[in-house]
Amino acid sequence: MSTFARAVVKVCATKACALGERTRDSVADAREEEEEEEEEEERADVLEDVTSWAQRAVERGREESEKECRERLPPLEDMRDQRAFFTAATRALDDRAAADDEDDETMRRDRKASTSASRRRRNRRVYAALYSPSRGVYRVASNTNGSNKALHAEMNLLLSARDDEFTTTTAGRRIIDPDTVLLTTLQCCRMCAALALSRGVVDAVYLREDPGKLATSTELQRHPARERAFDWNQP
């Protein structure tokens, strides 16, 4: 399994099985993964092809993300640099936090609804963007993980970009612009960090550190020069 595939399992599921010859290294890796897993009940797993379901999920995430960004963020031409994106995203996050607080208060008054249950289906508020010095901010996305754990902002950003938002090599393979920096309001988890590197992102800049266990030992953190916190004092 690739680093990205293993990270997806970590974030979204509990266990994965890979078929193939077990070498000493693979045995050691498997043992390390097992030690990291939380205690869970043993159950029989059945392999099922979910490609079509996954494709629909990615498309739905893209549509929901684009709608959210249209409503909450300014046009791309108004976010020409990193500071402009983070300023706009911070404003949008503050607005959403205020709206969420109002929703919670309404639900507290309505004793038929459970606030904790509603939060479990709520999207975690995160925005991400692709930025290059030559193009500025050229794509944005938001989290849509309320109904699908995999659809983080970075996943919506990197999995479903249209053809015209990628450059093309002579071999016909689509890649991100070679000087692209990933901007995100929350530090990447293991899944999103692995995807970013596999897609050719050269650097990542985040607004807030993620203290969660799934945001530790990421592929970006293993390359310290490629990830940093945004500095508001930077000109």
Image (spheres, rainbow, N blue to C red):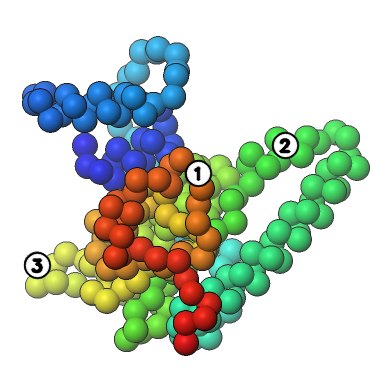
**Residue type at mark 3?**
Ala
User: Quick check: 56 above or below 23?
Assistant: below
Q: Nearer the viewer, mark 3 or mark 2?
A: 2
Kindly report the distance in space between the C-alpha atoms of the residues bearing marks 3 and 1. 39 Å
Q: Quadrant of residue 162?
A: bottom left
Quadrant in which the N terminus is drawn: top left
Classify mark 3: helix, strand or loop. loop
Say which label, 3 or 1, has the lower sequence index: 3
Q: Is residue 219 in view from this perspective?
A: yes
Nearer the observer, 76 or 30: 30
Near mark 1 (Cα within 10 A), the count class, few <14, some 14-19 or many ≥20, is few
**Residue type at mark 1?**
Gly
Q: Residue under label 3, please give it.
A: 171
Q: Quadrant of residue 90?
A: bottom right
Identify which residue is drawn at 29% across, 65% down: 225
Q: Is residue 18 in view from this perspective?
A: no
Q: Left or right: 148 with respect to 122?
A: left
Instruction: Find residue 39 and report its horizontal and vertical position in percent.
Output: 44, 19
Label ID, residue 116: 2
Kindly report the distance in space between the C-alpha atoms of the residues bearing marks 1 and 2. 19 Å
**Residue type at mark 2?**
Ser
Q: Nearer the viewer, mark 1 or mark 2?
A: 1
Instruction: Check whether the beta carbons of the residues at disc 3 and disc 1 lie within 8 A of each other.
Output: no
Q: Residue under label 1, please give it.
A: 212
Say which label, 3 or 2, has the lower sequence index: 2
Classify mark 1: helix, strand or loop. loop
User: Quick check: 180 above or below 80?
Assistant: above
Identify which residue is drawn at 34% across, 84% down: 133
Instruction: Find residue 54 and report its horizontal and vertical position in percent.
Output: 38, 43
